[in-house]
Amino acid sequence: MFGLSELVILLLVVIAVLAAKKLPELTRSAGRSARILKAEARASEEEQPAGDRAEPRVLRGEIVTPAATDTGQPRPRA
């Protein structure tokens, strides 16, 4: 009887043999996706100043950043 590790190795070999034509295309696509994700994350970090990186809150249906709520003045009531 096969153990779990032997079945995993056998499955990987079968996938590699059956998908040999598509494998380079799939790895290129995965690499492009990873580069795009990394670039978007880096751009997102550069857009926000260091003090505004906290999670935004929702007040009365509006998204408000923590810096906008810390004015020291009382909020007007609706």
Image: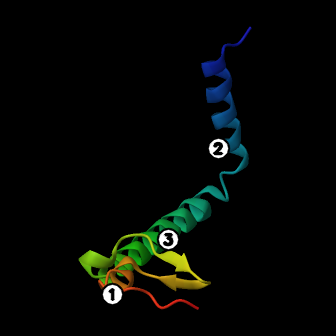
The image position of residue 75, as x and y in percent, is: 44, 87
**Circle 1 residue:** 73
The image position of residue 41, as x and y in percent, is: 40, 73
Which element carries disc 2, helix, strand or loop? helix
Horizontal side, residue 42 vs residue 34: left or right: left
**Circle 3 residue:** 32
**Circle 2 residue:** 16
Q: Amino acid at mark 3?
A: Arg
The image position of residue 15, as x and y in percent, is: 69, 42
Which element carries disc 1, helix, strand or loop? loop
The span from disc 2 to disc 1 (Cα, nearest Å) is 64 Å
Q: Residue at x 64, y 36 (%)?
A: 12
Circle 3 or circle 2, nearest the eye: 3
Q: Residues within 10 Å of mark 3 (few under 14, many from 20)?
A: few
Rendered-image quadrant of the C terminus: bottom right
The answer to whether residue 11 is above or below residue 58 is above
Circle 1 or circle 3, nearest the eye: 1
Q: Residues within 10 Å of mark 2 (few under 14, many from 20)?
A: few
Q: Residue at x 65, y 51 (%)?
A: 20
